[in-house]
Image: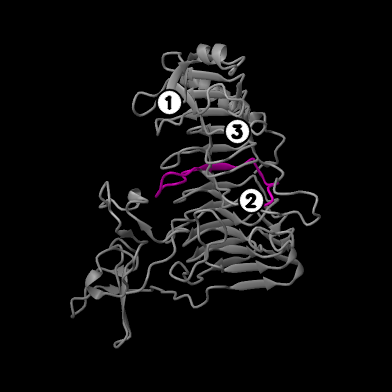
Amino acid sequence: FGRGGSQGGRSWCRCDQCSYAGKWCQPANDTRLVSGTWYVENVAEELDQPGEFYFDRRQRVIRLVLNQTSEWFDMDPGNDGMVKLKDLVLIVPRLKTLVHIENATDVTMSRLCFRDAQRTFLEKHGVPSGGDWSLYKGAAMVIENSSNVSVTHSQFMRLDGTALLLLDRTRHVRIAHSEFAWLGESAMAAWGHTEEWDGRDGRQPRQTVVEHNVVREIGIYEKQSSAWFQAKACQTVLQNNIFFNLPRAAINFNDGFGGGNLVEGNVMFNTCRESGDHGAINSWDRQPFLWDETGRFGFDTPPTVISRNLILANYGASQGVDNDDGSSFYHINDNVFWGDGFKMDYGGHDSNFQGNLVVVRPYDGQNCFNVANFKAGHAHQYTMNQCVILGCRGGCEEIVGTYSGCANAAAIVLENNHYYTRAGNATIKCDQRVHRLVEVQANFGKEGGSSAGLLPSTPVLLTWAQERVRSWSSLKAL
């Protein structure tokens, strides 16, 4: 037996602390430990699924379970009764890292194909920052302490670990016009270094550009995987990419280090296909950092801008953007979302959600917005949005949003929003009570200029979405 991989940032938890992690946990006073996944390998008796194999070390024979419709089968068995294989090539990866660029500048790699790197999900992982994810500190291609590196028009295919990793002080790395598919873990990741909360020495990936890439079919082995992951990295530009068919979030910000990120012009769908409690874009921000090398800024950061993206939060995804656990300084503007709307909780502040079209599918009732308050002067803003609620599990489709502190100055700013429900009514839940929109406007000084109406027809709704996407024509074409 060997201990399973590090699927998340937390491998062990007690039942009374996280009963959701074990279906067998009792509702009260259960202190048993819930562990991560454990793996058993190379047991001949367990061969019962296509893709499984057993290696007999004594006889130097591999027993492999194939799909019997495979073109490699010779369906005429021999004298020993065994079905023979013809022209089958088995590749056994030997290297975890194929290319390592370190302490270099002005490097260009183009029109290359990278494949068949060894799996790493059972290797020792590290927790790069305060988010939930852990990571193996390696990949098929590693770019470390380097600048002005360009990786373009390339393929990263059939790699059993992460495809590309930026480590420590990297500057002006560009990853463009490439395809990432059939990967064991993440497609691209960036992992920086700090001395506890102090990152002013600049040992982080900064000014990275990821554009015009296609990422699909990843996270085959490790489910905490994404098209782009970053921890202790900042000023990343993610634009004009297509991300789909993923087990977890397409983009994951494991912390808020440095901010200044731009997510623009991307198409994301079929995320969280093997998980939930997550968004197509996911973020955490549980620890503030000093980040500015000039010393002019403190712990505050420039905003991360998420704008003009088409995001379908289908499968297990809840929101287009799931801003979790203290996430702050996010500007989410002019997007089209299929899924729940604006989420901010556990100390998040200074974010705005403006001018978006949100089409809410029946999910968990967070609907158009669900936020917590903070201090006066640092409230979130939810303004000028169109939110269409197609349904809600449990009869909550008229509750367009939830916040705390009904008339509190530190609560969210709400104004000029337009809500659409089956009955044409809109209510807002605050302090555990449900209030009609007109009551919120009259009694709490919120939702000025906002309205409620009946659901638009499907052709009208599609026209709204199409008009928004067409208005983004200034974006570079994919």
On the image, the x and y values in percent for residue 82 come to 22, 75
Q: Say which quadrant the C terminus sits in.
A: top right
Q: Nearer the viewer, residue 277 or 98?
A: 277
On the image, the x and y values in percent for residue 15 come to 32, 53
On the image, the x and y values in percent for residue 356 come to 59, 29
Q: Are marks 3 and 2 in contact (CB under 8 Å)?
A: no
Callout in the foreground (3, 1): 1
Q: Say which quadrant the N terminus sits in.
A: bottom left
Q: Are marks 1 and 2 in contact (CB under 8 Å)?
A: no
Q: Nearer the viewer, residue 238 or 59?
A: 238
Residue identified by numbered label 1: 432
Q: Nearer the viewer, residue 196 or 383?
A: 196
Q: Which residues are magenta?
A: 256-279
Callout in the foreground (3, 2): 2
- Residue in the image at 75% along x and 54% along y: 292
Give the CA separation, mark 1 to mark 2.
Answer: 31 Å
- N-term mark: 3 or 2: 2
Magenta stretch: residue 386 in it? no
On the image, the x and y values in percent for residue 5 come to 42, 66
Residue identified by numbered label 3: 335
Could you say whether the residue bearing mark 2 is in a helix, strand or loop?
loop
- Residue in the image at 46% along x and 71% along y: 123
The amino acid marked with disc number 1 is Gln
- N-term mark: 3 or 1: 3
